[in-house]
Image (cartoon, rainbow, N blue to C red):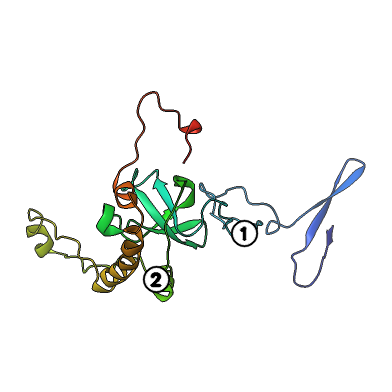
Amino acid sequence: MSATQGSDQPASKTKKFGKGEREIPHHTQKAKKFYPAEDESKPKKVRKSIKAARPRASLTPGTVLILLAGRFRGKRVILLKHLPQGVLLVTGPYKVNGVPLRRVNARYVIATSVKVDLKGIDDKTVEKVGEEGYFTREKANQKVGEEAFFKQGEKPEKKKVASARADDQKSVDKALLSNIKKESMLFEYLRSTFSLRSGDRPHEMKW
């Protein structure tokens, strides 16, 4: 005995088992016996909305920070601006301790009580440096084929800083250096490197 479920859908059969009846679906409606060995990746649903990063109260523009991680860890830098997603725009200045304009994570800095006057810095330059894509590297033309094979033993080419970035660095440092020289021992303080020795208690120090 068969029962039709619609013109488009295949019919299912009804069979009797003892005193009861059971409807058996068509073979096209049955569940698959075999599944792919690897699960298909699905994009993860993010329900949480991205919130704007809240900077610490001690992280104000002009504050001298101590870097705790990265290439320049232990260096003292000057905070210029807060960038989105908890990133800070800082500079050494470069002529003082060799730290250029760069972005650092706010979690890996210590804010000190020392402040530097930012008067005289061009706001347009700071805004330009803080834009997305400013610090992205230009992709060099990679050598392929036989030329790349014979170039393996040669010394790698030195990284060249873009002239626009060098001009921005000079304009920011010029204003900062004039303000730093007005304060006694501030130049030497920024030039020195922070480090801890055995017996030091950083949680008891006053920054």
Viewer-side label of 1, 2: 2
Examine the rendered structure and indicate whether residue 165 appears above or below residue 40.
below
CA neighbours of label 2 inside 10 A, class few (<14), some (14 to 19), many (20+)? few
Q: Earlier in the sequence, mark 1 or mark 2?
A: 1
Residue 96 occupies quadrant:
bottom left
Q: Which residue is mark 2?
A: 120
Q: CA distance from mark 1 to mark 2?
A: 33 Å
Locate residue 133 relative to residue 159 in the image: left or right: right
Task: Name the foreground residue: 170 vs 104.
Answer: 170
Pinpoint residue 62: horizontal percent, then vertical percent: 45, 58
List the residue tagged with mark 1: 51
Q: Quadrant of the N terminus?
A: bottom right
Direction from residue 163 to residue 14 in the image, left or right: right
**Residue 82 appears at what percent x and percent y?**
49, 61
Which amino acid type corresponds to the residue marked 1 in the rendered image? Lys
**Residue 93 image offset from top left, x and y in percent:** 31, 58
43 w.r.t. 189: above or below:
below
Q: Are marks 1 and 2 in contact (CB under 8 Å)?
A: no
Frontmost residue, 148 versus 97: 97
Callout 2 secondary element: loop
Is 202 or 162 nearer to us in this picture? 202
Residue at 71% from the left image edge and 58% from the top image edge = 29
Q: Residue furthest right?
A: 19
- Identify the residue at horizontal 20%, vertical 61% (top origin): 159
Q: Which mark is residue 31?
A: none
Could you say whether the residue bearing mark 1 is in a helix, strand or loop?
loop
Q: Amino acid at mark 2?
A: Gly
Q: Nearer the viewer, residue 151 or 161?
A: 161
Q: Position of residue 174 (x, y in %)?
A: 30, 67
Callout 1 crowding tier (Cα within 10 Å): few <14, some 14–19, many ≥20? few
